[in-house]
Image (cartoon, rainbow, N blue to C red):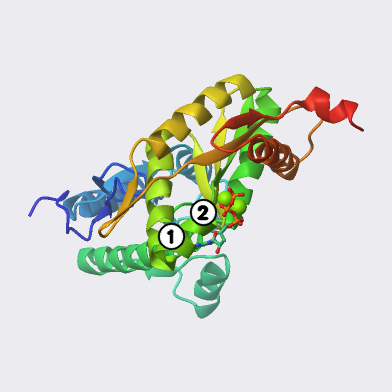
């Protein structure tokens, strides 16, 4: 079996295309970072891991390990405790502090005393391996740590998604909107938001039942995803309302995107069993402006525009006008 085959436990496999991941299926080996100031240990551990099918990068001290970790995002780190400059404990703490979902760290240590091992685990390591160690044990511990990481990543992904549609849920949207706003502000780049609400959706439930309504929501979510760019952030805002966040996009361009999206959404009716259900949507568009302070301000502006789209007869897109809003104050 090749090291990159689909069911190889040494590979991270993300299946996908689907709404849930929005990734093209790929399958590549886990990347392990080995940090040890001893060149012989580094070379041996690296060659064992490569022999077991992992991709490996190596660092000769703590600073280099942190630099490589930041640049290449390894899935796991094997770190020597005693190194010149930053030691293994410091590397481990910096890795934990650097991300909400840090990769697991396993210590390589010559220390056999309990307090040294306790200090390692307290620094955030998931395991330690006492030198000298055997090939099989090292690889087995790496495998075990990556198994746990895969479960953890899967749980984190599920927590970020809406159960019905697989799109990002409200909480994840808020997190990502905050990050996108900060980026747009820092680099003075345009940033826009679409708030989409399906028209007369209650009638779908009333006429065809809740299960058909659910099918419409799932299909609408897929169509919204199909119509948006890979860099856009798509989520379910709640009920039959969806949000698309568009980095690097002005309000005017977001209106074009919104109209294209409405076209995709309504092009063909949704089929649920034998029933055929046409769908239409109204969209409020707002662009980030200096007057706004948080992502909530952007949502509020898009919501105002959406309200106007509904008032003006639905099945249309409205752009929030910051000047009109200010003149009403
Ligand atoms: P408008 O054109 O003004 O948006 O009218 P509407 O009927 O779409 O809006 P309204 O807010 O009155 O109704 C939204 C409906 O969406 C009511 C609610 O029962 C339904 N809904 C919310 N979440 C779900 C869901 O997860 N599944 C189903 N089937 N229906 C849902
Ligand atoms: Mg609604
Ligand atoms: Mg609606």
Q: Is residue 37 left or right of residue 143?
A: right
| Residue annotated with mark 2 | 201
Q: Give above or below for 186 relative to 37.
A: above
Disc 2 to disc 1, C-alpha distance: 8 Å
Is residue 164 at all visible to an observer of this figure? Answer: no
Residue located at (45% from left, 68% from top): 126
Is residue 79 or residue 95 the one in the foreground? 95
Question: Which residue of the protein is positioned furthest toward the right in this rendering?
Answer: 329
Residues under numbered marks 2 and 1 in contact, where contact means CB atoms less than 8 Å apart = yes
| Residue annotated with mark 1 | 213
Q: Earlier in the sequence, mark 2 or mark 1?
A: 2
Q: Secondary structure at mark 2?
A: helix
Whether the residue carrying mark 1 lies under 8 Å from ligand 1 is answered with: yes
Residue 226: quadrant of the picture: top left
Is residue 27 at all visible to an observer of this figure? Answer: yes
Q: Where does residue 178 sit, x and y in percent of width and height?
A: 66, 43
Whether the residue carrying mark 2 lies under 8 Å from ligand 1 is answered with: yes
Residue located at (67% from left, 36% from top): 181
Q: Is residue 303 left or right of residue 272?
A: right
Is residue 188 or residue 52 the one in the foreground? 188
**Which quadrant holds the C terminus?**
top right
Q: Disc count in the image?
A: 2
Residue count near mark 1 (Cα–Cα under 10 Å), binned few <14, some 14–19, many ≥20: many
Is residue 100 or residue 178 the one in the foreground? 178
């Amino acid at each position: 079996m090749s090291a990159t085959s689909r069911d190889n436990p040494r590979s991270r496999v993300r299946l996908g295309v689907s709404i849930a991941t929005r990734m093209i299926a790929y399958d590549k080996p886990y990347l392990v970072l080995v940090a040890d100031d001893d060149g012989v240990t580094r070379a041996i551990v690296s060659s064992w891991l490569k022999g077991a099918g992992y991709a490996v990068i190596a660092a000769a001290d703590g600073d280099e390990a942190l630099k490589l970790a930041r640049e290449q995002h390894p899935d796991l780190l094997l770190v020597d405790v005693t190194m010149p400059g930053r030691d293994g404990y410091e590397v481990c703490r910096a890795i934990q502090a650097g991300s909400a979902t840090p990769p697991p760290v396993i210590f390589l240590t010559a220390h056999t005393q309990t307090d040294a091992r306790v200090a390692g685990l307290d620094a955030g390591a998931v395991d330690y391996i006492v030198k000298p160690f055997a090939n099989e044990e090292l690889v087995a511990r790496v495998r075990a740590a990556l198994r746990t990481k895969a479960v953890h990543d899967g749980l984190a992904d599920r927590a970020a998604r809406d159960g019905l549609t697989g799109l990002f849920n409200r909480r994840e949207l808020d997190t990502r909107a905050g990050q996108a706003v900060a980026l747009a502000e820092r680099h003075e780049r345009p940033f826009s938001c679409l708030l989409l609400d399906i028209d007369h959706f209650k009638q779908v439930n009333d006429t065809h039942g809740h299960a058909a309504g659910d099918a419409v929501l799932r299909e609408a979510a897929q169509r919204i995803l199909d119509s948006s760019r890979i860099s856009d952030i798509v989520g379910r805002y709640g009920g039959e309302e969806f949000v698309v966040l568009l980095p690097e996009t002005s309000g005017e361009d977001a209106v074009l995107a919104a109209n294209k999206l409405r076209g995709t959404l309504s092009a063909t009716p949704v089929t649920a069993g034998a029933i055929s259900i046409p769908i239409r949507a109204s969209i409020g568009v707002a662009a980030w402006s200096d007057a706004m302070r948080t992502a909530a301000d952007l949502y509020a502006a898009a919501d105002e525009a959406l309200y106007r789209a509904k008032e003006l007869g639905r099945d249309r897109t409205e752009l929030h006008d910051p000047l009109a809003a200010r003149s009403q104050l």
